[in-house]
Amino acid sequence: MKQNNSTSCLQLARPIIIAILTILFIVITHCAGQVEAKRSRMNKHHGHNHHHAPAPASAPHYGDTESSMFNVLSFGAKGDGVSDDSKAILAAWKAACMVPSATLVIPQGLKFLVKPISFKGPCMPNLVLQIDGIVQAPPKVGSWKKSSLFQWLNFKWIQNFTVQGTGTVDGQGSEWWSRSQMLHYDVQGTSKHVLGMKPTALRFYSSCNVNVRGISIVNSPLCHLKFDNSRGIKISNITISSPEDSPNTDGIHLQNSQHIEIEHSNIGCGDDCVSVQTGCSDVYIHHISCGPGHGISLGGLGKDKSVACVSNIVVDNLSLESTLYGVRIKTWQGGVGSVKNVSFSNVQVSDVKVPVMIDQFYCDKKFCKNQTGGIAISGIKFDQFVGTYAVQPLHIACSHDVPCTDVDLVDIQLKPLPGLGGSREALCYNSYGKAVAPLVPASIDDCLRSDGGSIKRIARSHDVGCQ
Ligand SMILES: *[C@@H]1O[C@H](CO)[C@@H](O)[C@H](O)[C@H]1NC(C)=O
Ligand SMILES: *[C@@H]1O[C@H](CO)[C@@H](O)[C@H](O)[C@H]1NC(C)=O
Ligand SMILES: *[C@@H]1O[C@H](CO)[C@@H](O)[C@H](O)[C@H]1NC(C)=O
Ligand SMILES: *[C@@H]1O[C@H](CO)[C@@H](O)[C@H](O)[C@H]1NC(C)=O
Ligand SMILES: *[C@@H]1O[C@H](CO)[C@@H](O)[C@H](O)[C@H]1NC(C)=O
């Protein structure tokens, strides 16, 4: 399976890590000496305690269990929703980052206004960011600097890190959504290349062994939670929420990332609930409810004839309500690469326009130029889909040049919404595989074509560019 070498965690940052670890080693060795002295004094009275963070008695922040808690209020944060708390939170981060198993606390009951900031690692392992309060982005579009438009909260080069809590991260996106057609920053300084950029709320870059749990992420200007060049990610029990008509507000966006689990979470937004992009493999998404939104998507892949590789994706136990699509693979014409070994199972749909979709003619505007070639799609299983659709039960449109192979439809029972007149039949184009009953509507039964082996050889000859 495809593993791009450049994506392995923290590889780019290696020289920086070595420098920082060297410094930390010196600091810790120094501290450990003092702690041992302190411990041997304490042990006479209290016995040994392995849980306490090692630190010199003279440093107020590192002395005992309390000391591995770094409350942003102690670093000057106001939490009044008006004052700019960015500097205080960054100072607390820097302090917590230096201590093993530290917890950075954003306390409950307060609102912290935070400008775009970068939380940079490497940090000592097992750092926890405990968000119990509300973290808010600046509401006025004009107060963002052009250089910070990629993301609001940027986590970079971090290992063994957890974000958790009962709090909310609020991107305050409404002004961005309504002005999306009007406000265009000219990033290059020329009027020729104008970009309408909007920030992602939380972005992790080149990080590994990251947990995100409990928190809510709401109203992002663009995507809510994004992972790039990362591995070993677990997302559980989170809530993502933005209005159905907020443009391009993906829930979770994965790119060039591997070994990911997303589970027991509620996602409702204006675009894909989960979007899996090129370079992703070994992704397990389960017990998710999605809606409003555009469903769970692999792609759009292969834009401008680019190479895209996606493999070993499992989506299980998914419930979708009033979404545009259920599960979808979307690729542009002319792309190179492959999507393989994908399974979608135990999917419950309710008022979903098109529950099952493969679209190799993806186009985000009215017309896209026809291109030859396409991404090879194989080994895609749709198993146990039940519920109601509003437009078409199933739409599998594979490339003219590259057939989809081993597409399996097993136990699909989809009914038109009550009162829906003239719903469309299931559609399959250039797609090969098997269908296993029960299948409702009956048009699903003879939708796929069966292959004697020659089609697979054609398809395989197009599967290039991914290992
Ligand atoms: C980081 O997390 C991984 C996976 O949970 C674990 O195997 C590893 O031992 C941890 N490393 C440190 C330094 O704690
Ligand atoms: C899920 O997160 C919420 C806080 O957002 C918390 O109250 C609840 O206990 C968590 N549930 C589990 C099963 O962890
Ligand atoms: C398909 O993906 C699953 C889940 O990631 C994995 O366990 C399995 O080994 C993969 N199969 C192949 C043939 O790679
Ligand atoms: C998902 O799992 C839960 C229990 O974990 C179960 O009650 C529910 O029926 C499952 N949903 C689907 C669509 O399989
Ligand atoms: C692309 O090809 C299809 C069918 O081959 C044709 O109907 C369509 O008009 C073409 N589109 C463009 C933009 O050339």
Image (spheres, rainbow, N blue to C red):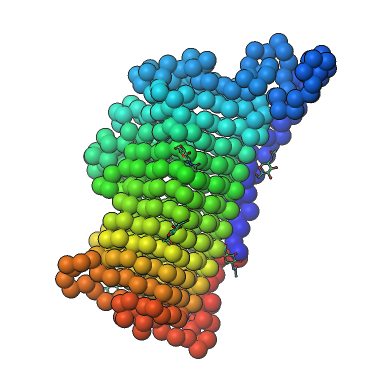
Q: Is residue 321 shown above or below 191?
A: below
- Front one among 158 and 425: 425
Q: Residue at x 62, y 39 (%)?
A: 159
- Front one among 36 and 379: 36
Q: Residue at x 53, y 52 (%)?
A: 261
Left or right of 239 in this view: 6: right
- Front one among 235 and 459: 235
Q: Is residue 295 shown above or below 375?
A: above
Residue 163 in sight in this render: yes
Q: Residue at x 56, y 37 (%)?
A: 162
Q: Is residue 430 shown above or below 204?
A: below
Residue 304 in sight in this render: no
Left or right of 192 in this view: 14: right
Q: Which corner quadrant of the figure contains ligand 3? A: bottom right
How far across and down, in percent of the image, does residue 157 sit?
59, 38
Quarter of the image with the N terminus is bottom right
How far across and down, in percent of the image, does residue 164 sit?
51, 35
Q: Quadrant of residue 369?
A: bottom left
Q: Residue at x 49, y 66 (%)?
A: 343
Residue occupying the far bottom of the picture: 452
How far across and down, in percent of the image, does residue 312 sit?
55, 63
Quarter of the image with the C terminus is bottom right
